């Protein structure tokens, strides 16, 4: 998480949303300072913030979850990813669950020899959500990964800050370079599953499926399931992780 008392902003860094690149720009050029852990959420900041800091402009970045899933998948194809462990400061529950979850998916990708369809259908059955659902209603501004440069410029204008330079890319997934994540979503069974699991999140965060997918309809009850699951997810991400 990044804060600037000079420019009165708080940047909530959500994983897989170019938050590292934005972080570097804020630290190097726009008076930012690191606070708490990198991916801590806003409600943790509220516990330590002064009354004045609670009035700062709060922003975060989001990304098409289909792209996030593709990025996770490409990461699993890289052996050295498993050498990265959850930081010691995180809760025991998160460390144990994170290690188990990653190992399980890593082993499965090896078992199916990198077949994305088999991997996706195995691990993505329920409505998708990520940490963005926890504090998103508190955000004053959202930077979309898909047009990060334009949104970052608009943010600086909102803050009354003159932009120094475009945001350089940082922390990219190496073996994803040059590949379009949509290339993984071409099989009809994969498309239907994607419509089911991503549909509710898409509606909440303003994303849309390709026009050529218009013939695929979301399964009944996914929106209700999404809302129900998110109650438990929010509790876990706020109280346990």
Image (cartoon, helix red, strand yellow):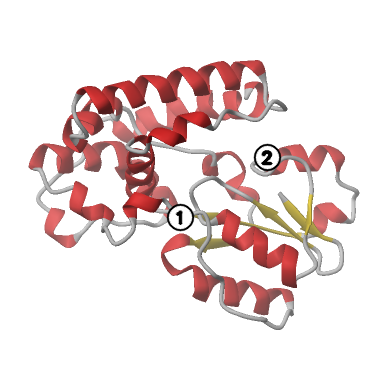
The image shows residue 127 at horizontal and vertical percentages of 34, 33
Helix, strand or loop at label 1? It is loop
Identify the residue position indicated by label 2 in the image. Answer: 40
Q: Name the quadrant containing residue 42.
A: top right
Q: Is residue 64 above or below residue 114?
A: below
**Where is residue 27, by image quadrant?**
bottom right
Q: In the rendered view of the protein, which quadrant contains the C terminus? A: top right
Residue at the (48%, 48%) spot, across then down: 16
- Earlier-in-chain disc, 1 versus 2: 2
Relative depth, front residue between 155 and 90: 90
The residue drawn where x is 32% and y is 37% is: 77
- Residue 137, compared with residue 123, is above or below; it is below
Where in the figure is residue 137, as x and y percent of width and height?
60, 49
Q: Foreground mark, 1 or 2?
A: 1
Q: Which residue is mark 1?
A: 172
Q: Which mark is residue 26?
A: none
Q: CA distance from mark 1 to mark 2?
A: 21 Å
Rendering coords of residue 87 (x, y %):
65, 30
- Could you classify mark 2 by the number of other residues whose Cα lies within 10 Å: few (under 14), some (14-19), or many (20 or more)? some
Q: Is residue 77 visible?
A: yes
Of residue 238 and residue 20, the one placed in the foreground of this image is 20
């Amino acid at each position: 998480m990044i804060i600037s008392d000079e420019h009165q902003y708080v940047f909530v860094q959500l994983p897989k949303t170019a938050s590292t690149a934005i972080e570097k720009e804020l630290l190097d050029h726009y008076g930012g300072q690191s606070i708490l852990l990198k991916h801590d959420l806003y409600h943790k900041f509220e516990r330590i913030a002064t009354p004045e800091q609670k009035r700062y402009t709060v922003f975060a970045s989001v990304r098409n979850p289909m792209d996030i899933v593709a990025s996770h998948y490409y990461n699993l194809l890289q052996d050295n990813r498993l050498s990265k462990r959850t930081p010691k400061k995180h809760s025991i529950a998160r460390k144990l669950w994170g290690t188990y979850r990653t190992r399980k998916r890593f082993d499965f990708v090896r078992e199916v020899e990198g077949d994305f369809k088999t991997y996706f259908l195995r691990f993505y059955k329920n409505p998708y959500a990520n940490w963005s659902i926890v504090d998103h209603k508190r955000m004053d501004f959202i930077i979309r990964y898909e047009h990060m440069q334009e949104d970052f410029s608009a943010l600086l204008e909102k803050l009354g800050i003159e932009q120094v330079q475009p945001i350089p890319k940082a922390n990219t997934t190496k073996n994803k370079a040059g590949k379009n994540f949509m290339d993984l979503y071409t099989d009809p069974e994969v498309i239907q599953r994607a419509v089911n699991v991503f549909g509710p999140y898409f509606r909440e965060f303003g994303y849309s499926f390709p026009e050529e997918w218009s013939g695929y309809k979301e399964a009944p009850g996914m929106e209700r399931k999404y809302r129900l699951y998110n109650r438990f997810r929010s509790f876990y991400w706020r109280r346990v992780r």
